[in-house]
Every structure is written in structure tokens, then in C-alpha cells.
Image (cartoon, grey):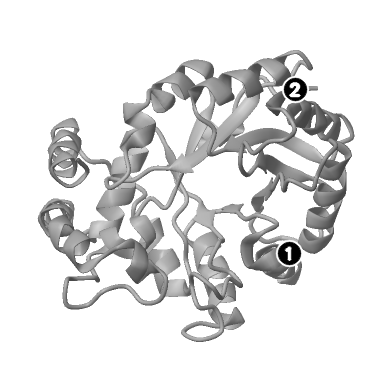
């Protein structure tokens, strides 16, 4: 039977697992290893963060394998873990049966019989949103999926997905979208408000903008690899006043870091941020966004500072 309440509404922070095994963007195997990622998993659970978001394309399946391995290594009496993964509608997947096969492969890599949240990674053609949502509903009916989500869907696409699931007696649980102080398109497009009205949880990916909002990067110390192509020296320089405000607000809340303040801002907006964690220290830092709240005035001041960067 479909759930009457959205269990995602009980969560404040999760863990994004894109970095787990990804060599192209994140350089897995160079600056961090499987042991580092395992430590991030354990530190997250120890801090009370138990929602992990992965995808079949992260590390070409390696992220799912790592998450499955780490869950199996834990004692049966350990912390319960909630798992979200994603289906990518590659253009050669020309029937809804492709979703069932991909899902079974994800479950095999994860070592699970059911995934808590299964999401459409992108709203790509040629198959319609309605066709894919019908396949998602079939997966729920088969007991392979607990709840259905989408990712990178705009308002119109989200409306169509929710309506298609509704015809099968199901609710759309989530829409995962990029959302941070440096990317507020979900607010400006009306998607955040639309999802709130519909009871759909917005899961915010890249909530600290691939490390830019952590404050560790400056015009003289840019992020490595592909991220340097995304965030130029000029861009990082333009962000510095916002970083300074994040630092000041963090000090006012007992020494919170810029990243923790940025995550708390997303929580205050009603989103569920899923920052990445490549090691235990990053996982502990992410969990430091929990247990306190920015005031409405502080949120407004961050909104104003953000507007000076995001034109």
C-alpha cells in the first residue's frame, strides 16, 4: 500500500555518494581511497546521518558497490540505513522494461531486496515521463522500491510525474535538484514552493557547491581537476564576501564552519541537503549542520549576499 506520509520529511541531512568511486570529477584513488570512503560512511552513521544517495552511473556502479559493501560489513544490530539510488534513462533504453533490469542490477550491487527511494536521474526523451512513472509504479507493486522520486525535473515535469503516479495510487516522494546559496534556481523558478505544496521533498544536491562554500578555496587556491574549469578564479573571487558572511554567522553560532552554515541555510529553506563526504572528517563536518538553526534574519542576510553573487 502507498505510504500516507512522506518519510523523507523526517530527515534534515543526508550523504551524497557521487565521490565514492568517481575518478573523473573527484579523483578517487588519488587523494582518497576505499578506506577513506568507508570511514565517511561510519562517521556519518555515528553522527546520526543515515540517508545515503547514490546512482547507477556514479563511478560506473562503484558507488553502489561500496555502499552495499559497507552496509554488509556492519553488525546486524548497527544503525539502520536508508538508501536512495537512481535510474538513468539512456536513449537506448527504449521500453519501460529497461528500468526493471537496471533496478535489479542496482539492487544486486547494493545487496538489497528493496531500495528505499528510486529516482529518475534525468527527464530525458525519447520515452515519456508517464511511461517511466508507470515503470516506477510497477517496481513499487513488485516490492522492489519503497518510494519514487525524480531528479532535475522542472515544475511542469514534476506535475506530470506526480499525476502519473497518482493514477496508480502512489505519491511522488521527492525531486532532487541542485540547490545552494550559489544556485537558487529552484526558488526562482517556483519549483521549491510547488514541491512544498505538493508534499514532495526537495533533495538538494551540491549544497556546498562542490566545496566552494566551504571557504577552503580562494583566488590563489582554486579547486583541482575539472572543478577548476567550472569555478574560475574570477568566480571564486566574487564569492569571497559571501564566504566572509558565512564565517561571521558561524562564529555567532558557536564556531560553525562556512559549509555548516550553508547546509543549515538549505535546511531552513525546507530542503534536504545531501553533501558529499570523501572521508570521516568531511562526514563529521557535514553533520555539524544539525542541532541548531539560523534565525530568519540570518537567512535573509544570506539571501541578500547570495543575490550579489548569483546575478
Q: Position of residue 78 (x, y in %)?
A: 67, 61
Quarter of the image where one finds residue 256 = bottom left
Pick the front one: 153 or 275: 153
Q: Residue at x 57, y 67 (%)?
A: 41
Query: Which of the numbered marks, if any, corresponds to residue 140?
Result: none
Horizontal placement of 67 versus 220: left or right? right
Front one among 21 and 260: 21
Q: Residue 73 occupies which quadrant of the picture?
A: bottom right
Residue 8 appears anywhere in the view: yes
Percent of width and height locating residue 151: 57, 39
The quadrant of the rendering that contains the C terminus is top left
Of marks 2 and 1, which one's residue comes earlier in the chain?
Answer: 2
Residue 110, given in percent of the width and then of the height, sits at 76, 60
* Residue 273 percent across, percent down from the top left: 43, 46
**SS assignment at label 2:** loop
Residue found 35% across the figure and 56% down from its top:
209
Instruction: Tell me: 1 left or right of 23.
Output: right
Give the residue at mark 1. Answer: 68
Which residue is at 70% across, 42% downward? 116
Q: Is residue 242 left or right of residue 157?
A: left
Counting labels gives 2
Q: Residues within 10 Å of mark 1 (few under 14, many from 20)?
A: some
Residue at 28% in and 47% down: 182
Per the model, the C-alpha gap separating discs 2 and 1 is 26 Å
Q: Quadrant of the N terminus?
A: top right
- Secondary structure category for the residue under label 1: helix
Q: Residues within 10 Å of mark 2 (few under 14, many from 20)?
A: few
Q: Are marks 2 and 1 in contact (CB under 8 Å)?
A: no
Q: Does 299 appear above or below 256? A: above
Which residue matches tag 2? 2
User: Which of the two residues, 54 or 256, is positioned nearer the viewer here?
Assistant: 54
**Residue 11 visible in the snapshot:** no
Amino acid at each position: 500500500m502507498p505510504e500516507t506520509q512522506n518519510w523523507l520529511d523526517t530527515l534534515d541531512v543526508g550523504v551524497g555518494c557521487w565521490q565514492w568511486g568517481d575518478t573523473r570529477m573527484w579523483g578517487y584513488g588519488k587523494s582518497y581511497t576505499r578506506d577513506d570512503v568507508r570511514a565517511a560512511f561510519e562517521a556519518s552513521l555515528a553522527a546520526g546521518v543515515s540517508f545515503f544517495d547514490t546512482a547507477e552511473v556514479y563511478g560506473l556502479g562503484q558507488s553502489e558497490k561500496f555502499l552495499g559493501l559497507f552496509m554488509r560489513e556492519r553488525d546486524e544490530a548497527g544503525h539502520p540505513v536508508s538508501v536512495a539510488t537512481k535510474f538513468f534513462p539512456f536513449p537506448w533504453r527504449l521500453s519501460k522494461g529497461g528500468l526493471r533490469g537496471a533496478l535489479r542490477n542496482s539492487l544486486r550491487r547494493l545487496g538489497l531486496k528493496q531500495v528505499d527511494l528510486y529516482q529518475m536521474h534525468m527527464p530525458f526523451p525519447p520515452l515519456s515521463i508517464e511511461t517511466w512513472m508507470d515503470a516506477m509504479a510497477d517496481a513499487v507493486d513488485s516490492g522492489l522500491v519503497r518510494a519514487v522520486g525524480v531528479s532535475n525535473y522542472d515544475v511542469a515535469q514534476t506535475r506530470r510525474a506526480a499525476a502519473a503516479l497518482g493514477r496508480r495510487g502512489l505519491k511522488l516522494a521527492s525531486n532532487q535538484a541542485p540547490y545552494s546559496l550559489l544556485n537558487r534556481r529552484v526558488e526562482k523558478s517556483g519549483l521549491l514552493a510547488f514541491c512544498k505544496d505538493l508534499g514532495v521533498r526537495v533533495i538538494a544536491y551540491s549544497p556546498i557547491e562542490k566545496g566552494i562554500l566551504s571557504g577552503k578555496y580562494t583566488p590563489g587556491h582554486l579547486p583541482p581537476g575539472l572543478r577548476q574549469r567550472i569555478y574560475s578564479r574570477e568566480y571564486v573571487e566574487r564569492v569571497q564576501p559571501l564566504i566572509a558572511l558565512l564565517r561571521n554567522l558561524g562564529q555567532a553560532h558557536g564556531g560553525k564552519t562556512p559549509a555548516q552554515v550553508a547546509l543549515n541555510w538549505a535546511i531552513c529553506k525546507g530542503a534536504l541537503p545531501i553533501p558529499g563526504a570523501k572521508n570521516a572528517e568531511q562526514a563529521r563536518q557535514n553533520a555539524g549542520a544539525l542541532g541548531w538553526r539560523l534565525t530568519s534574519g540570518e537567512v535573509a542576510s544570506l539571501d541578500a549576499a547570495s543575490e550579489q553573487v548569483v546575478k
